Amino acid sequence: MGFLFESAGFHFYRCPSCTYVKRGEPASATIHKYHDESYAAQYGDEAEQRLKKRGVLGLCARFAPRRARLLDVGCSLGYMLEEAETMGWEAYGVELSEDAVAKARARGVKNIEVKDIVDVDFPGGFFDVIVMTHVLEHLDDPFGYLRKMARWLKEGGILYISVPNFSSHSAKRDGKDWTTLVPEEHISQFTARALKAAVEKYSGCAVREVSGDHRFGEEPRGMMATIRYFLGYLKDRLLIGRGLYVIAQKPKGASRRA
């Protein structure tokens, strides 16, 4: 890993071959940010969040069985779990923020735990779909998480991962001043190339789709909003928008080979 830049007192290094970028300071230096009320408060726009969750579930549903079992890693206020249940899915969630989980449970959300996935385990092949939206960038060891989640997937199961896009136009333009860098929170940064390579290598799943997630949560109304939406769509397809997602599928026979 070669030194890339310093931002807000944090040091970032890049792998020259795969383009993966990692912060030198460990997650333990900033983990407190996920344990106060301000963390859950940033997801307070419920209508927008539910639109985003439905967008993600719609993508996964193309590959999943009609009555799937889903795990949302970093489930925050539990909106994904509720939206999945309206589709007839069985939903589980794990989340670090005690405040976020308390708010979810107060609404009646079930199967939600205050845990890191390093501290929880499920039977092998338990889930049809595992979703991790904008969590991988917060981790010291994103590759170990990918391995563990893959063990929980059924053969043919779907892994959905989304992260900030370090190969975006704005990231290339702004470098250490990129607003989505968020150096005090984000440990790992992925380009489209690095994310695809990591998912394939460490989860063993075959990548089915790579695109941007800019449009999730939007319902454009009016000419200008529609134009902005279309421009966002183009950025997504060209992989130069601020966010990325990968959908990958666990091969048949993978469990037997492991």
Image (tube, rainbow, N blue to C red):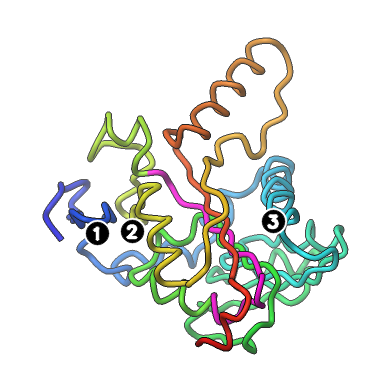
Residue 214 lies, with reference to residue 253, above or below; the image says above
Disc 2 from disc 1: Cα separation: 6 Å
- Identify the amino acid type marked 3: Cys
Disc 1 from disc 3: Cα separation: 31 Å
- Identify the amino acid type marked 2: Ser
Q: Percent from the top left, x then y, of residue 125?
A: 65, 83
Q: Callout 2: 10 Å neighbours few (<14), some, many (20+)?
A: many
- Per the image, label 3 sits on a secondary structure element best described as helix
Q: Which residue is mark 3?
A: 60
Residue at screen point 52% across, 40% down: 212
Earlier in the chain: of badge 2 and badge 1, it is: 1
Q: Percent from the top left, x then y, of residue 119?
A: 50, 86
Q: Which residue is mark 1?
A: 23
Q: Which mark is residue 39?
A: none
In this rendering, which labeled residue sits more in front, label 1 or label 3? 3
Q: Which residue is mark 2?
A: 188
Q: Percent from the top left, x then y, of residue 251?
A: 59, 72
Residue at screen point 48% across, 72% down: 204
- Identify the amino acid type marked 1: Arg
Give left or right: position of 44 versus 132.
right
Q: Percent from the top left, x then y, of residue 126?
A: 69, 82
Front in this rendered view, residue 200 or 223: 200
Query: Can residue 151 be found in the magenta stretch?
Result: yes
Which segment is the magenta one?
150-165
- Per the image, label 2 sits on a secondary structure element best described as strand
Give left or right: position of 55 versus 191.
right
Earlier in the chain: of badge 2 and badge 3, it is: 3
Q: Callout 3: 10 Å neighbours few (<14), some, many (20+)?
A: many
